[in-house]
Image (cartoon, rainbow, N blue to C red):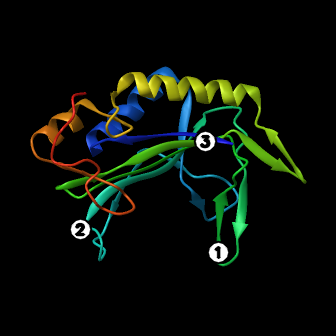
Amino acid sequence: MSRQFQLYLLPAEVEWLVSQLRSKFDLRLLQEHSPTSKSVELDSPLRCCSATPKWNAHTDVRCYIAKATGADVRMWYASKRAEWLLADESEVIEFSGCKFDGTSLADGRFYLQTEKLVGDAIIPKRPEFLTWADRVFRTTKRLLFRSEALHAYLGPATVQWWRDGGQLVSLISRKPAYGSEIPDI
């Protein structure tokens, strides 16, 4: 099983949120890949990306949040890519999305798997991790505004940017996430 929630955050709010979480939790940000079997720690969750046919030059988020100490973080070697990747059974929260190109902001998400595969059995991840992850999820949600219309959480600057004409879109389709009418938040 898994847990997740959607969110819309402008780049400055991504940094603000991570700063808030770091002040409340002993955590580190991990890159999804590594040249060695050791995970790579990040200072910032933001990536700057060049233009693609579907997107202008933009920033986005792609990192994993783990406890700074005691987290079970595993890597596996992807031979076709010739690099190491974080394994699904790792005790991490995926933080991804929030593509922003100056005119549109795509949804992002916090996601975690609550179980792992051991042999042929599916078993829950350690209770210590699940309790910690639940606290991180609850704290993150409390720091943001909930939009029932979008089924997502938004940062305060994102709400204002949206009200001032910014466009919230679906990461997958790039279509507006909600019509031109802005619901109350």
Residue type indicated by callout 2: Asn
The residue pinned by badge 3 equals 112
Residue 9 placement (x, y as % from top left): 31, 41
Residue type indicated by callout 3: Leu
Residue positioned 59% across, 26% down in the render? 134
The residue pinned by badge 2 equals 56
Image quarter for residue 102? bottom left
Which disc, if any, is residue 82?
A: 1
Residue 158 placement (x, y as % from top left): 23, 38
Which disc, if any, is residue 91?
A: none
Could you tell me how far apart the alpha carbons at marks 1 and 3 are, in whole angstroms? Answer: 25 Å
Circle 3 crowding by C-alpha within 10 Å: few under 14, some 14–19, many from 20: many
Quadrant of the snapshot with the N terminus: top right
76 lies above or below 39 = below
Residue positioned 23% across, 58% down in the render? 101
Could you tell me how far apart the alpha carbons at marks 1 and 2 are, in whole angstroms? Answer: 28 Å
Determine whether, in the image, residue 20 is placed left or right of residue 111: left
Could you tell me how far apart the alpha carbons at marks 3 and 2 are, in whole angstroms? Answer: 29 Å
170 lies above or below 124 = below
